[in-house]
Each structure stands twice: as C-alpha cells, then as structure tokens.
Image (cartoon, grey):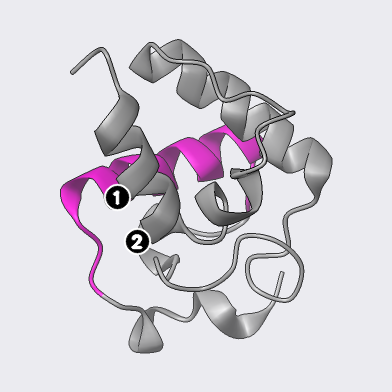
C-alpha cells in the first residue's frame, strides 16, 4: 500500500463512496480505515495497490450487495475500477438494491 491513502490529502467521500470504501477494507482486509481512502486515487497499482484478484473479490461483493453483475469480460472494467469515485458512479447507475 502506498501513502496515497493519506487522510490529510484525501478528497471528501460521498456516502456511496464511503460505503464502497468500507466494502474494500472489509473484503480485502486492508490495513487502513475506509475514511482514509482518497476516492480519486487509482485502485490498481501505484494508487491503492490492488491487483486483479483483489478486484475480482470486490466485484463479487458488489454484485452480492447491490444486485447487479460486474463481469470480468466487460471492456469498461478499466474505467469502472479506475478509482473509488468511478466505481461508485457505476454502482449508482446499475444498482438494483438500496
């Protein structure tokens, strides 16, 4: 994990971003608080440091919680999982549960 999760530099999270940050922390057992995740940093690589297996775990949890499928063969995955903010926007557009 990098210092990109520094709360002093974090952009404010929307309620859905905060909820998804908690999903990330809990599903992946991250050693940080959900509030410390900057919603604009990349989820992959140098940002939050997630890899493809982490993203798969998060996708499964989001599918379960929000009632829609995130497919591994979706060509938009790079954009969907670009940041917490982009993931939240996708969930907001596609969720079938509150």
* Residue behind mark 1: 18
Q: Which mark is residue 35?
A: 2
Stretch in magenta: 12-30
Residue 40 vs 31, above or below: the answer is below
Q: Secondary structure at mark 1?
A: helix
Q: Position of residue 79 (x, y in %)?
A: 55, 55
Query: Residue drawn at (26%, 36%), measured in percent from left and top?
Result: 92
Q: Main secondary structure of the magenta part?
A: helix
**In which quadrant of the rendered image does the N terminus lie?**
bottom right
Query: Residue drawn at (70%, 61%), measured in percent from left and top?
Result: 44
Marks 1/2: CA distance? Answer: 7 Å
Magenta segment: does it hold 61? no
- Badge 1 or badge 2: first in the primary sequence: 1
Q: Quick check: marks 1 and 2 in contact, CB under 8 Å?
A: yes
Magenta segment: does it hold 21? yes
As drawn, the residue found furthest toward the bottom would be 9
Query: Residue drawn at (65%, 33%), measured in percent from left and top?
Result: 74
Q: Secondary structure at mark 2?
A: helix
Along the line of sight, which residue is nearer the eye, 2 or 65? 65
Q: On the image, which quarter does residue 94 sit in? A: top left
Q: How crowded is the residue under tag 2: few (<14 C-alpha within 10 Å), some, or many (20+)? A: many
């Amino acid at each position: 994990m990098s210092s990109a999760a520094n709360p002093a530099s974090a952009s404010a999270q929307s309620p859905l971003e905060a909820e998804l940050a908690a999903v990330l922390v809990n599903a992946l057992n991250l050693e940080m608080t959900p509030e410390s995740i900057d919603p604009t940093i990349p989820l992959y690589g140098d940002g939050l440091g997630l890899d493809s297996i982490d993203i798969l775990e998060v996708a499964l949890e989001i599918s379960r919680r929000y009632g829609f499928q995130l497919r591994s063969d979706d060509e938009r995955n790079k954009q969907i999982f670009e940041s917490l903010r982009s993931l939240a926007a996708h969930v907001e557009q596609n969720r079938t549960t509150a």
